[in-house]
């Protein structure tokens, strides 16, 4: 395979999966009464569980199907309680899958091949509709082909699928497809299509203008088992969308046909009824602009027949409620004959890809751009004073004239927003920087569209909610909580240890000091434990205090020795003396502490001890871990036959500062006993402790920070976790979806000591101390490891640049076909004088007023770190229909290295075909430490400059095909050198030394050398493939990594000979007269790596993401993906993962039937990149498959899991 020939190997990982939702389905996929939502995001299938009680949406499972999901449908067989999912993907196969709630995974039931793979015009998969009664589904292509599959069940009650029935017709393009609701009659499917064969043959173009849009019914005759074209009729030529109208006992059946400014009810045996789509009324609105329906949902109300409504959404985001009145019989029951159609304004929500109405009274909006919203219905808009428009007042013929109707948009009345689900789609660009002074850098991104754009900071960590932070009289060294008796549910005391005292606080409505606890308060405490039925143990340097029902027993430490370390559980106590001796106590049947006769002498000073909890059903914990300052950990047995005998020993790189024996969930679903070790050097180790022999195996490590690590056992979401404290707190737990053990930092202040905290008000909490503060906090969500903070931006962001020294970002933004602020103000003034209607609605909900050919653009200064959330410090609007297209911070040598902000603009731009009246380069000086900008001057150029880059104290600009070097003059920029180096349009620039790497919009990369002696720019190497470049970065002097518009990531490298020749002094004559090769530069670039991540890369940079980690390539995709490419250091690792990847391809083939290797090599065969997302699915395999793969690779299962986890934790999140 091509992969083996590369000498560069990278490991591709997704650290933030795509957040866009292209389609959302509602159904009962678990087989219970609860409704769930299935969403498609790129190649990921996600199951969401809306929680109506809390008003939240939780992710249950997310599965990468390694294929492009084109369409989805849900269906249910008659008489069953469970919905199945049909997937139409680019695999050329139809897949039927079900969700297994017990195993929390998707399982494929059927996979039927019908065509070629890939997204093609004539291969079915673009449209998919399932009969409401679950008897058949129709899968159609954009053009020509339609296939019907009959769904049934066999004698064993298993789902069966028939051979496909064809309904092909050449020369037909389909725009929309739905299944009709016909009760239990033969299934019928409705398609909106037009024939283009005549228009294709006609060279004059007359036939194309007279194309007729047809509404066609296809009927599946279940008796004869074939499909017929049952009925067709001409509809409005602007129609684009169909919605199913309930049938059978629920309604009249038929469809709603949505076109430009009209919604028509159509059915084969009913008359047509038409209502217009109301237009917005307002001072800044264009009264002649027509609206189109882009999304919608139908909902049946429980109880009464014929009670249903539609919510249809226009491209402005306005929701309209459409209802259908039926003719009633003598008894007042609806007959199924339509009387009229009614429409009224409902509310305004973000423009959606999909809308889902839940039976529990919620609306899920899968937004096209920006955050997804979860609303609750307050009312159904029946009794408000919104004007209602009916079909009685409008002609059914779409050519007949009519008066447009208007409505006034208003804030939400019928819906209330319950939760906003973070989505970074579209992600336009990102930068990685460490501005908060933490260990790991943060990712700063610009995303969104129009007024719903945002600047976001992404940080790796878990969200912590603080409940209490109170000041203490001194600085404690440790904290514990304890119950009073064995049977208490909640903790009763908080015990704080100071350097020479102990403070006991009671937990209740208020926290107060307790004086009669029986604890010795004049000494520091080493450990606290509730023992036996109702005893308490306090261990202090001079002895052990055992308190039972107010009676106190003291065990004093031997003379001239003190206790330096202690560990306890419900039945056992172990202490270490300053002389290196270990003393073991066990609880007798009568509740008193019995000392074991012999003391065990250790070789060094004991630094830490751990016992572990008593396993259920046993008297004692069998093992004791002892850490000494000679950098070792020893495991001692506590069994009666071999008490304090050494079972195993492990050498460490530093002295252990903390030990913890505890059992945790592992990837198989069972539990394993682990020894967690924290070192003085800040390293955390997790080792498997064999429950029989006491051997230590399979060690995993992670560097947490420069301070000694302390470990504590806590519970989060009913899961036992380890809390590790170093320079910041970390939580080790089993990830809910992937079942991997992960160590994630908490987004919280540094802590010195913590303990679990359980009270009526705060269950599963934690209590911690830092300096003289006591803090009580909880961790709520384990699934989300990326914390987002955001602030809104004004228009769609285009570029993000950072100040060279200060922590400020500069965002240029522009929106096309949008009224600029000066025109908006003008219109509002006029309207105020005319009709007094000058109400301005918030643009983030209602959008900006539209205006053809107009641009609204600005520069915003963002401060991401000084406050809780990022904020915009200053906005500078651009006037005169100019729009910002590029920006860079450039230091000019002529100004003693002072940095300036350079912004490139275009005037009166038209995007397609590309045109503009002029371009300009604006220069701004930073003032007030970068918090403000001062305009210096502007230089007019021939077209908008799409790329800037600082170059040897001057500005390098890509203007069309031209590459220019400018210097800063007093009144404008001064041109110093130029050359035509690109075939089409320069979109990216990168430089090192005298080398310039130019990315062309359509022709890939060109390497250019600048010769200062002759002041010439000379191209010397270019690409073998015409790549549609979107972003590039130099990886080293010879290599460039980049992404293109087809969703590929690649690395190209300049041949060594050409690279050396270009840098030779005096080589310009040779380079200028070198023979061009195939109309290009004299040399060609070599392709080093190529990968298809299924998202369009918008930015790529070389950086490191973890403390002490190696450099990686971080890329962002437009669907909200953030991914990394990690270089392999050794050939051995590359070979191991390559073998693992090929086994995973065979043992865990993609769910929808796409071939993984062909999918990752969509346009160019995959080369030099191993798919980490596939390798990470190893932990989700059944045990027998894991064992088989491990046998083939000659490794143990644990070893493979460790390697997979290591490569992620050492280089990425």
Image (cartoon, grey):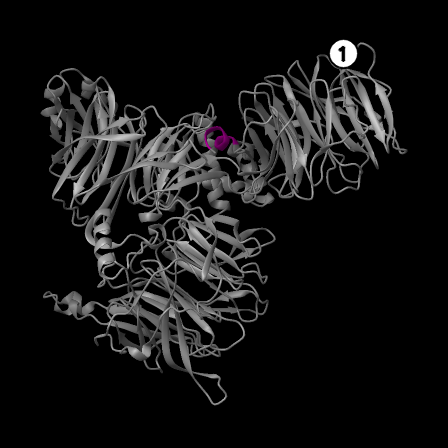
Image-quadrant location for residue 251: bottom left
Label 1 belongs to which residue? 579
Image quadrant assignment for residue 723? top right
Taking the view exactly as shown, the residue that stands out farthest to the right is 590
**Majority secondary structure of magenta residues:** helix
Q: Residues within 10 Å of mark 1 (few under 14, many from 20)?
A: some
* Residue 886 visible to an observer of this rendering: yes
Residue 370's spot in the image, x, y percent?
Answer: 38, 48
Q: Nearer the viewer, residue 267 or 274?
A: 274
**In terms of secondary structure, where does tag 1 sit?**
loop
Which residue is more in the foreground, 87 or 465? 465
Residue 24 as seen in the image, left or right of residue 821: right
In the image, farthest residue toward the bottom: 330
Does residue 689 appear to the left or right of 639 in the view shown?
left
Residue 1194: image location, x then y, percent: 55, 33
How many numbered discs sit on the rendered protein? 1
Magenta part of the chain:
1206-1212
Q: Residue at x 59, y 17 (%)?
A: 653
Q: In the figure, is residue 702 to the left or right of 823?
A: right
Q: Is the N terminus in the top left, top right, bottom left or bottom right quadrant?
A: top left
Residue 40 in percent (x, y) is at 43, 53
Q: Using the rendered view, name the quadrant where residue 471 is placed.
A: top right
Which residue in the rendered view is the most extreme toward the top?
560
Which of 1208 and 830 lies nearest the eye of the viewer? Answer: 830
Q: Residue at point 90% right, 33% down?
A: 590
Q: Residue at x 60, y 43 (%)?
A: 1183
Does residue 1153 show up? no
Above or below for 578 versus 252: above
- Residue 210, image x, y percentages: 17, 71
Q: Is residue 782 magenta?
A: no
């Amino acid at each position: 395979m091509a992969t083996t020939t590369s000498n560069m190997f990278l490991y591709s990982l997704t650290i933030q999966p795509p957040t866009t939702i292209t389609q959302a389905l509602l159904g009962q996929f678990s087989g219970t009464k609860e409704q769930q939502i299935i969403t498609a995001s790129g190649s990921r299938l996600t199951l969401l569980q809306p929680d109506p009680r809390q008003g939240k949406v939780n992710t249950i499972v997310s599965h990468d199907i390694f294929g492009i999901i084109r369409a989805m449908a849900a269906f249910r067989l008659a008489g069953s309680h469970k919905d199945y999912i049909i997937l139409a993907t680019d695999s050329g196969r139809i897949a039927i899958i079900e969700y297994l709630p017990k195993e929390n995974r998707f399982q494929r039931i059927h996979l039927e091949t019908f065509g070629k793979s890939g997204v093609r015009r004539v291969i079915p998969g673009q449209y998919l509709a399932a009969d409401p009664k679950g008897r058949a589904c129709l899968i159609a292509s954009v053009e020509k082909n339609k296939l019907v599959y009959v769904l049934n069940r066999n004698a064993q009650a298993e789902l069966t699928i028939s051979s496909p029935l064809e309904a092909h017709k050449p020369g037909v393009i389909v725009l929309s497809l739905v299944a009709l609701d016909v009760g239990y009659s033969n299934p019928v499917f409705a398609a909106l299509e037009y024939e283009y064969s005549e228009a294709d043959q006609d060279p004059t173009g007359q036939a194309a203008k007279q194309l007729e849009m047809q509404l066609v019914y296809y009927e599946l005759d279940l008796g004869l088992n074939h499909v017929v074209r049952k009925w067709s009729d001409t509809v409005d030529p602007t129609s684009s969308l169909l919605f199913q109208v309930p049938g059978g006992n629920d309604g009249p059946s038929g469809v709603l046909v949505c076109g430009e400014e009209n919604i028509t009810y159509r059915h084969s045996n009913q008359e047509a009824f038409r209502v217009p789509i109301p237009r917005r009324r307002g001072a800044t609105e264009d009264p002649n602009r027509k609206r189109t329906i882009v999304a919608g949902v139908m909902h049946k109300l429980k109880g009464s027949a014929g009670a249903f409504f539609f919510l249809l959404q226009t491209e402005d985001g306005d929701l309209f409620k459409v209802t259908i009145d039926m003719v009633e019989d003598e008894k007042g029951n609806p007959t199924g004959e339509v009387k009229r159609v009614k429409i009224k304004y409902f509310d305004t929500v973000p423009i959606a890809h999909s809308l889902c109405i839940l039976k529990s009274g919620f609306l899920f909006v899968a937004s096209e751009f920006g955050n997804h919203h979860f609303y609750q219905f307050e009312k159904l808009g029946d009794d408000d004073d919104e004007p209602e428009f009916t079909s009685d007042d409008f002609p059914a013929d779409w050519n007949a004239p009519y008066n447009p109707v208007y409505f006034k948009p208003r804030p939400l009345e019928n819906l209330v927003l319950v939760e906003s689900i973070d989505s970074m789609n579209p992600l336009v660009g990102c930068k990685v920087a460490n501005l908060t002074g933490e260990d790991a850098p943060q990712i700063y991104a610009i995303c969104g569209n129009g007024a719903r754009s945002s600047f976001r900071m992404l940080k790796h960590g878990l969200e912590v909610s603080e409940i209490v932070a109170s000041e203490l009289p001194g600085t404690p060294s440790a904290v514990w909580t304890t119950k009073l008796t064995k049977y208490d549910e909640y903790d009763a005391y908080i015990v704080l240890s100071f350097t020479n005292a102990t403070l006991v606080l009671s937990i209740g409505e208020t926290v107060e000091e307790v004086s009669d606890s029986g604890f010795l308060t004049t000494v520091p405490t080493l450990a606290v434990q509730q023992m036996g039925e109702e005893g308490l143990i306090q261990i202090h340097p001079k002895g052990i205090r055992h308190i039972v029902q107010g009676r106190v027993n003291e065990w004093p430490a031997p003379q001239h020795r003190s206790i330096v370390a202690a560990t306890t559980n419900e039945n056992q106590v172990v202490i270490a003396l300053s002389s290196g001796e270990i003393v073991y106590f066990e609880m007798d049947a009568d509740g008193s502490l019995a000392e074991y006769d012999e003391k065990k002498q250790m070789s060094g000073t004991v630094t830490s001890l751990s016992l572990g909890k008593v396993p259920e059903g046993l008297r004692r914990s069998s093992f004791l871990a002892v850490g000494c300052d000679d950098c070792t950990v020893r495991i001692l047995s506590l069994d009666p036959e071999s008490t304090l005998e050494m079972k195993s020993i492990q050498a460490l790189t530093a002295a252990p500062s903390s030990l913890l024996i505890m059992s945790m969930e592992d990837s198989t679903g069972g539990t394993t006993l682990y020894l967690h070790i924290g070192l003085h050097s800040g390293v955390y180790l997790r080792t498997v402790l064999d429950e029989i022999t006491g051997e230590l195996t399979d060690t995993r490590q992670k560097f947490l920070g420069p301070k000694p690590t302390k470990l504590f056992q806590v519970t989060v979401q009913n899961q036992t976790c380890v809390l590790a404290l170093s320079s910041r707190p970390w939580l080790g737990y089993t990830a809910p979806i992937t079942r991997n053990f992960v160590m994630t930092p908490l987004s919280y202040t540094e802590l010195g000591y913590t303990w679990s905290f359980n009270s009526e008000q705060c269950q599963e909490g934690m209590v911690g101390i830092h300096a003289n503060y006591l803090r009580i906090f909880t961790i709520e969500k384990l699934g989300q490891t990326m914390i987002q903070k955001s602030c809104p931006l004004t228009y769609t962001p285009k570029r993000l640049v950072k100040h060279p020294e200060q922590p400020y970002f500069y965002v240029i933004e522009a929106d096309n076909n949008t009224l600029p602020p000066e025109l908006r103000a003008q219109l509002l003034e006029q309207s105020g004088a005319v009709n007094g209607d000058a109400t301005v609605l918030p643009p983030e909900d209602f959008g900006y007023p539209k205006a053809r050919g107009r641009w609204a653009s600005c520069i915003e200064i963002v401060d991401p770190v000084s406050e809780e959330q990022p904020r915009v410090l200053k906005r500078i609007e651009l006037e005169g229909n100019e729009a910002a297209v590029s920006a860079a911070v450039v230091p000019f040598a002529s100004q003693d290295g002072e940095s300036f902000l350079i912004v490139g603009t275009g005037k009166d731009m038209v995007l397609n075909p590309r045109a503009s009246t002029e371009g300009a380069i604006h220069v701004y000086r930073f003032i007030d430490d970068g918090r403000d900008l001062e305009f210096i001057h502007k230089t007019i150029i021939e077209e908008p400059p799409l790329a800037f880059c600082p170059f040897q104290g001057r500005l390098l600009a890509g203007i069309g095909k031209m590459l220019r070097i400018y210097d800063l003059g007093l009144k404008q920029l001064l041109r110093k050198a130029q050359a035509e180096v690109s075939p089409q349009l320069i979109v990216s620039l990168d430089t090192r030394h005298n080398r310039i790497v130019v990315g062309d919009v359509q022709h890939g990369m060109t390497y250019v050398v600048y010769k200062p002696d002759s002041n010439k720019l000379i191209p010397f190497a270019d690409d073998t493939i015409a790549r549609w470049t979107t972003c590039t970065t130099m990886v080293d002097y010879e290599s460039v990594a980049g992404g293109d518009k087809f969703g590929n990531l690649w690395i190209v490298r300049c041949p060594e000979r050409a690279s050396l020749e270009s840098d030779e002094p005096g080589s310009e004559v040779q380079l200028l007269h070198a023979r061009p090769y195939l109309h290009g530069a004299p040399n060609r670039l070599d392709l080093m790596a190529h990968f298809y991540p299924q998202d369009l890369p918008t930015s790529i940079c070389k950086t490191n993401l973890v403390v002490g980690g190696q450099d990686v390539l971080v890329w962002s995709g437009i669907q909200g993906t953030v991914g990394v490419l990690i270089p392999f250091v050794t050939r051995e690792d590359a070979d191991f993962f390559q073998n693992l990847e090929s086994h995973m391809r065979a043992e865990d083939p993609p769910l929808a039937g796409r071939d993984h290797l062909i999918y990752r090599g969509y346009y160019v065969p995959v080369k030099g990149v191993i798919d980490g997302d596939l390798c990470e699915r190893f932990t989700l395999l059944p045990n027998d498959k894991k064992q088989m793969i491990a046998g083939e690779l000659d490794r143990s299962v644990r070893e493979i899991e460790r390697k997979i986890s290591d490569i992620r934790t050492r280089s990425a999140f």
